[in-house]
């Protein structure tokens, strides 16, 4: 088949027209590598070779664009290329080229990932570490950069979460609230010893909504209970939510004697 003409496209590509109405969109490097400007005619075998070589350039180009948008790790790039139906052999070559050209760097990825998660998320040290290990990052590299984060940073993040949870959990108090926050922090990956250190400065006594909650429970149960039975039901529900007898007794003086009788 004869080459009729070349038409320049965007991003360093050319559309090559043939006399049998076939077309090829080729990278400039593919044209130069195969000296097509000096060749007037090719066969079907060469046509297929050009297509495959161009596909390799395209795959590498896609990988570059993917890594430029955001710092990526090797596993992310591999998964991305696999979705593009790139062969495993070609993916290995692309990964090696990305490393050699510094477009892939495990160290830079770890530093950027830790910085982002510390500043922009509620993730604790252990959760950050596990996510990095899930991406096949070397554990020594992860530990190296996590160790650079001062414990004060983790404590401040913990305090921020505690303060937010205290506000959003006004209907519970004391040990119930404390346990809820503790398990939330553990699930977020914070170190248990650091959590305990921060907890020493909190009482987890939530006074703000106690009166409103008492009134709500009283109104709810007075339709079914009266007298001491009603008081017992309301008090028991408040105790279940972590409020102490002392806190409850301050709501209304008429409960003082009743609470004393329960002791």
Image: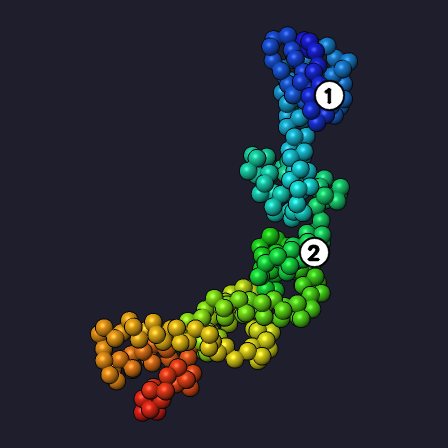
Q: Which one is in front in this view, the residue at disc 2 or the one at disc 1? A: 2
Residue bearing the label numbered 2: 111
> 76 or 65, which lies in front?
65
Residue 230 lies left or right of residue 26; in this view the side is left
Residue 48 lies left or right of residue 211; in this view the side is right
The CA distance from mark 2 to mark 1 is 40 Å
Q: Where's residue 194, x and y in %?
A: 60, 74
Q: Residues within 10 Å of mark 1 (few under 14, many from 20)?
A: some
Q: Where's residue 31, x and y in %?
A: 73, 21
The kind of secondary structure element at disc 1 is: helix
> 55 or 128, which lies in front?
128
Q: Quadrant of residue 123?
A: bottom right
Closer to the N terminus: mark 2 or mark 1?
1
Q: Residues within 10 Å of mark 2 (few under 14, many from 20)?
A: some
> 230 or 128, which lies in front?
230
Number of numbered discs present?
2
Q: Which of the colour schemes (rainbow, by chain, secondary structure, one colour) is used?
A: rainbow
Which residue lies at the image location 60% right of the left edge and 13% below the top edge? 22
Q: Residue furthest front?
A: 253
Q: Where's residue 91, x and y in %?
A: 63, 38
Identify the disc placed on residue 31: 1
| On screen, residue 231 above or below 220 | below
Whether tag 2 and tag 1 are in contact, CB under 8 A, the answer is: no
| On screen, residue 154 above or below 252 | above
Identify the disc placed on residue 71: none
Q: Quadrant of residue 56?
A: top right
Which residue lies at the image location 29% right of the left edge and 79% below the top edge? 233
């Amino acid at each position: 088949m004869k080459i009729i003409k070349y038409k320049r496209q965007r991003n360093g590509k050319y559309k090559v027209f043939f006399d049998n109405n076939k077309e090829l969109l080729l990278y400039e490097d593919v044209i130069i590598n195969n000296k097509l400007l000096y060749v007037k005619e090719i066969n079907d075998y060469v046509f297929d070779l050009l297509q495959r070589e161009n596909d390799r350039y395209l795959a590498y180009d896609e990988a570059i664009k993917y890594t430029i948008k955001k710092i990526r790790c090797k596993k992310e790039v591999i998964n991305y290329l696999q979705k593009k139906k790139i062969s495993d052999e070609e993916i290995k070559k692309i990964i090696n080229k990305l490393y050699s050209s510094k477009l892939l760097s495990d160290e830079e990825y770890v530093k950027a990932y830790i910085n982002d998660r510390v500043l922009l998320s509620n993730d604790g040290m252990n959760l950050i570490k596990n996510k990095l290990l899930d991406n096949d990052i070397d554990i020594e590299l992860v530990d190296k950069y996590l160790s650079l984060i001062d414990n004060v940073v983790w404590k401040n993040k913990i305090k921020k979460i505690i303060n937010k949870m205290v506000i959003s959990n006004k209907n519970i108090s004391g040990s119930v609230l404390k346990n809820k926050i503790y398990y939330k922090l553990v699930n977020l990956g914070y170190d248990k010893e650091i959590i305990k250190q921060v907890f020493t400065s909190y009482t987890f006594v939530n006074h703000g909504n106690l009166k409103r909650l008492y009134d709500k429970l009283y109104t709810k149960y007075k339709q079914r209970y009266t007298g001491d039975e009603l008081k017992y039901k309301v008090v028991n529900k408040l105790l279940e939510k972590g409020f102490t007898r002392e806190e409850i007794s301050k709501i209304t003086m008429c409960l003082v004697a009743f609470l004393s009788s329960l002791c």
